[in-house]
């Protein structure tokens, strides 16, 4: 299975965004945290910033929708070149319909689970998903500490993947550092999202390669 690093640009210095994006050459994906101040108590950025990021990179864009109406964003983000789109299923009435809409547009469909949301809540959808995003912190803010119990959740999802959807990718987001990346990968994660660990380092390439285990 793939072993990828998604650099979350939420922690970038937006006053020098071009330089920041250029320094992320070792990253596999650029992770976009979209927050609306409703589903989570924070605001991030929208289409104008994403359009700028898309012009600055040829890396796949990975959007995590922490918003109350993620289906409103599908076409707009697809037009901007977003390739991965994850949303929290409790924010929509018909998650299966959203998943099918994403697939029709050629966008990888993912469901995001908060630390307290059980895996049982997505069993009916597991076979239709391209990936599951397991939050290892409560969503909304950077610089939070990794919740250790998420390791068991990753292992459980990895077991379910083997039985129900072998191609499923497991993405983990929140508090990923050099101290826990190896454990997260060993538990079964394929995509590690990192924000503050990468952007607070002096050498982004070295930090990303460390997360990859290189």
Image: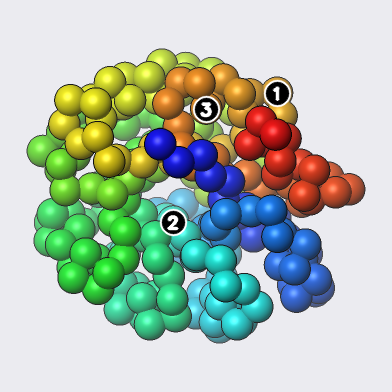
Residue 207 x/y as whole percent = 76, 42
Numbered tag placed on residue 179 in the rendering: 1
- Residue located beneath label 3 in the image: 185
Of 38 and 186, the residue lying toward us: 186
Q: Secondary structure at mark 3?
A: helix
Q: Is residue 177 visible?
A: no
Numbered disc in front, either 1 or 3 = 3
Q: Secondary structure at mark 1?
A: loop
Q: Name the image quarter holding residue 188.
A: top left
* Residue at the right extreme of this rendering: 202
Numbered tag placed on residue 74 in the rendering: none
Residue 132 x/y as whole percent = 34, 42
Q: Name the image quarter holding residue 21.
A: bottom right
Considering only order in the chain, which callout, 3 or 1, is on the residue closer to the N terminus? 1
Q: Is residue 104 depicted above or below 191 in this figure?
A: below
Numbered disc in front, either 3 or 2 = 3
Q: Is residue 65 depicted above or below 57 in this figure?
A: above
Q: Name the image quarter holding residue 39.
A: bottom left
Q: Is residue 170 left or right of residue 192?
A: left
Q: Secondary structure at mark 2?
A: strand
Q: CA distance from mark 2 to mark 1?
A: 24 Å
Q: Is residue 9 depicted above or below 173 in this figure?
A: below
Residue 107 x/y as whole percent = 31, 66
Q: Quadrant of the C terminus?
A: top right
Q: Are there few (<14), some (14-19), or many (20+) residues within 10 Å of tag 2?
A: many
* Label 2–label 1 contact, CB within 8 A: no
- Residue located beneath label 2 in the image: 64
Q: Is residue 78 visible?
A: yes
Numbered disc in front, either 2 or 1 = 1
């Amino acid at each position: 299975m793939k072993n990828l690093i998604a650099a979350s640009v939420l922690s970038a210095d937006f006053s020098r965004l071009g330089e920041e994006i250029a320094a992320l050459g070792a990253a596999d994906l650029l992770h976009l945290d979209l927050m609306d101040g409703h589903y989570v108590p924070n605001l991030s950025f929208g289409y104008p910033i994403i359009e700028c990021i898309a012009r600055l990179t040829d890396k796949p864009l990975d959007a995590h929708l922490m918003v109350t109406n993620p289906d409103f964003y599908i076409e707009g983000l697809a037009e901007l070149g977003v390739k991965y789109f994850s949303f929290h299923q409790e924010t929509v009435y018909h998650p299966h319909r959203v998943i099918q809409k994403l697939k029709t547009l050629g966008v990888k469909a993912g469901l995001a689970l908060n630390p307290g949301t059980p895996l049982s809540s997505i069993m009916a959808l597991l076979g239709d998903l391209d990936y599951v995003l397991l939050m290892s912190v409560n969503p909304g803010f950077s610089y939070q500490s990794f919740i250790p119990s998420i390791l068991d959740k990753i292992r459980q999802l990895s077991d379910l993947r083997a039985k129900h959807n072998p191609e499923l990718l497991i993405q983990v987001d929140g508090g990923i550092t050099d101290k826990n990346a190896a454990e997260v990968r060993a538990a079964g994660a394929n995509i590690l999202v990192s924000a503050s660990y990468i952007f607070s380092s002096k050498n982004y390439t070295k930090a990303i390669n460390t997360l990859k285990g290189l």
